[in-house]
Image (cartoon, rainbow, N blue to C red):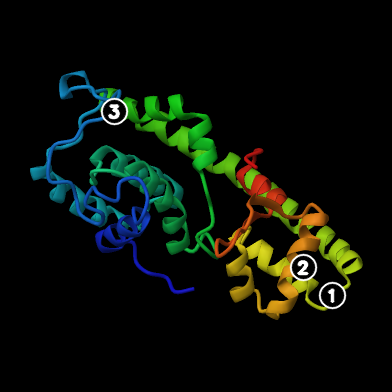
Amino acid sequence: MTHRRMSQSLLRTAHQMLLDGVRGRDKSPGQYRSAQSWIGPSGCSIDEASYVPVRQEQLQNGMDRWEEYIDQTAEVDVLVQLAVLHAEFEALHPFEDGNGRLGRILIPLFLFQRKLLASPDFYMSSYLESNREVYVEKLRGISRDNDWTGWIMFFLEGIRRQSFSNESKAKSILLLYDRLKMELVENMRSQYSIRALGFLFQTPVFTSTTFVKQSGIPKPTTTRLLGLLRELSVLTPIRMGRGRRAGIFAFRELVNLAEGKEIL
C-alpha cells in the first residue's frame, strides 16, 4: 500500500469521499467552512454554544500551522504528536460538517504514515463514543484550562485500550473464519465453498447481484449456495429479492463481531 503524506490536500480529499452520499453531502464536501461555526445543543445560538472555533478568516492560517506540525518529527513522541493533532483538528473545526468523523479517520491514517501500522486499520471510535462525555470535557479542558496533560493521558489510554480490544477482535475473526471453513466444506460439499466464504469476509453485507458478479462463482451455482448459507444460518436476509429487485443479505456473526455489539 502506498504511503501518501498527510496534508491538507489529503484531508480535503478524504472529507469529500466521507460525505459522498451521506449526511452532510450538501455542506461543501472537500471545502473549508466559509462562515463562523459553533458547537452546542441543536438549534442553539452562538451565545449558547459550548465551544466556538476560530473565525473563518483565521482558519486557513490555523490549518497551515496544523500541517506544519505534522512534519515536526524530531524529539516528538509519535503518539503524543497524534494526540495534539487530533485535538487541534477538532478545535479548528475546519469543515461545515463531518469534523468528528474525519477526526477519527485521521488517527489510523497518521499511524500508518508513521509506519506504526501495516495498514490504516486502527479504529478508536468505540472508545471515544463510549467515553464521549469525558472526551468532550478533556478537549474543553485544553481551551479552558490549558490542560494538555489531561487530554494526552486520556488519549493515550484510549490507544492502549483500543489496541487490546482490536487485537482480541482480530483473533476472534480468525477463529470464526477457521470454524466456518471446516463447517462449510463439510456441509456445502461444493468446490466453491471456500471462495464463497472469502467473499463473505470481504463483503459481509451485500446484494444477491453483487454476489453473482464479484464472487467468481458461476452464476447457476450462486443461487444454490446462497440458499445453503441461509439454511446454515450463516447469512441473514435483510430484504428478500422480488422480481428485478435483488435480495440483501448480511453475514450477521461477522458484522456483530466487528461492531462489538448486536446490531443484526
Q: Local crowd at mark 2 within 10 Å, few (<14), some, or many (≥20)?
A: some
Amino acid carrying mark 2 in the image: Leu
The answer to whether the residue labelled 2 contacts the one labelled 1, judged by CB atoms less than 8 Å apart, is yes
Residue marked by disc 3? 146
Rounded to the nearest angstrom, the CA distance separating label 3 from label 1 is 63 Å
Observer-side mark, 3 or 1, equals: 1
Kind of residue indicated by mark 1: Ser
Chain-order first, disc 3 or disc 2: 3
Count of marks overlaid on the render: 3
**Position in image of residue 178 (x %, y %):** 81, 61
At a point 60% along the width and 74% down the height, the residue shown is 214
**Quadrant in which residue 223 is drawn:** bottom right
Left or right: 251 with respect to 191? left
Q: Residue furthest right?
A: 186
The local crowd at label 3, few if under 14, some if 14 to 19, many if 20 or more residues have their Cα within 10 Å, is few
Q: Residue 55 location, x and y as percent?
A: 12, 38
Q: Nearer the viewer, mark 2 or mark 1?
A: 2
Q: CA distance from mark 3 to mark 2?
A: 60 Å
Quarter-of-image position of residue 51: top left
Q: Identify the residue position indicated by label 2 in the image.
A: 225
In the image, which is nearer the foreground, mark 3 or mark 2?
2
Q: In the figure, 220 relative to 238: above or below?
A: below
Most foreground residue, 2 or 15: 15
Which residue matches tag 1?
190
Q: Residue at x 43, y 63 (%)?
A: 113
Q: Which numbered disc, 3 or 1, marks the residue that appears first in the sequence?
A: 3
Residue 166 in the image: x percent, y percent?
Answer: 63, 48
